[in-house]
Image: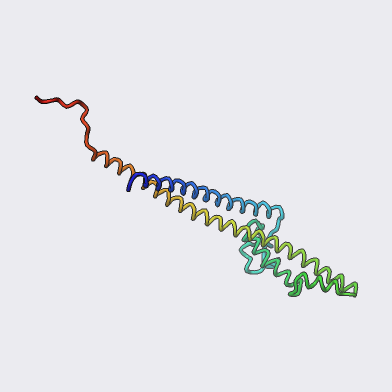
């Protein structure tokens, strides 16, 4: 391989190395930023799973008993399996839109108030459920960034290894060419008469 091609390859590897390193750092930042934001937004809300099933905690959520909701996984579990369960009971299988329409159509003031109370509860519950699921969605983006960081980091190591090989091989080639080059005399040849 001639020297010009070798240096082009080395330059391309250096550029790829820096691009992959930048991508790795960016993916790490996205991962850590996302997780920090989820934690920092959920912590002040002070949402806790009940301590036991007697307090209304379904069996499939026992792993979270008594814990504060601080991660995307916890937010998703709380939204879907805890709030979702209560919304299904409160709304009798119907969403907010159904109860809101019932309240608007009802003419009896007592029934109207009852339907509106259910609609209000459903609205608040579905809103909280949606916000918690949004935290979960962002945690999934954070996990994708984490796996991208690992992949980019491994690719960086591969390119670094190839670059190291190329540099070592270039030095080895240069040294072998230097050994094969004719030795030039250091003094003037003596003329023989």
Q: Foreground residue, 15 or 165?
A: 15
Q: Foreground residue, 63 or 130?
A: 130
Q: How many marks?
A: 0
* Residue 113 falls in image quadrant: bottom right
Residue furthest to the left: 193
In the rendered image, the quadrant that contains the C terminus is top left
Q: Foreground residue, 169 or 26?
A: 169
> Which colour assignment does the render follow?
rainbow
Give how far across and how far down residue 79 sits, in percent: 68, 64
Q: Residue at x 61, y 63 (%)?
A: 63
Left or right: 15 as drawn, with respect to 51 = left
From what the image shows, is residue 51 above or below residue 149?
below
Q: Residue at x 22, y 32 (%)?
A: 184
Left or right: 56 as drawn, with respect to 175 = right
From what the image shows, is residue 54 above or below residue 152?
below
Left or right: 64 as drawn, with respect to 90 = left
From what the image shows, is residue 137 above or below residue 116?
above
Left or right: 1 as drawn, with respect to 68 = left
Give how far across and how far down residue 34 sits, in percent: 62, 53
* Residue 93 falls in image quadrant: bottom right
Q: Residue at x 38, y 46 (%)?
A: 164
Give how far across and how far down residue 65 sits, in percent: 65, 62
Give how far across and how far down residue 156 sits, in percent: 46, 50
Q: Residue at x 22, y 34 (%)?
A: 183
């Amino acid at each position: 391989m001639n020297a010009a091609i070798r240096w082009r390859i080395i330059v391309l590897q250096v550029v790829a190395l820096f691009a992959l390193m930048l991508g790795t750092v960016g993916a790490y930042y996205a991962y850590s930023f996302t997780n920090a934001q989820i934690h920092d937004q959920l912590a002040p809300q002070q949402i806790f799973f009940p301590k036991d099933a007697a307090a209304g905690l379904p069996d499939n959520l026992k792993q979270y008993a008594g814990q504060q909701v601080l991660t995307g996984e916890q937010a998703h579990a709380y939204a879907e399996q805890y709030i979702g369960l209560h919304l299904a009971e409160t709304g009798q299988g119907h969403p907010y839109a159904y109860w809101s329409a019932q309240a608007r159509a009802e003419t009896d003031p007592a029934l109207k108030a009852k339907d509106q109370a259910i609609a209000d509860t459903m609205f608040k519950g579905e809103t909280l459920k949606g916000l918690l699921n949004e935290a979960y969605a962002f945690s999934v983006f954070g996990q994708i960034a984490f796996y991208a960081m690992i992949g980019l980091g491994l690719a960086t190591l591969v390119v670094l290894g190839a670059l190291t090989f190329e540099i070592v091989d270039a030095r080895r080639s240069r040294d072998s060419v230097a050994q094969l080059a004719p030795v030039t005399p250091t003094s003037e040849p003596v003329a023989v008469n």
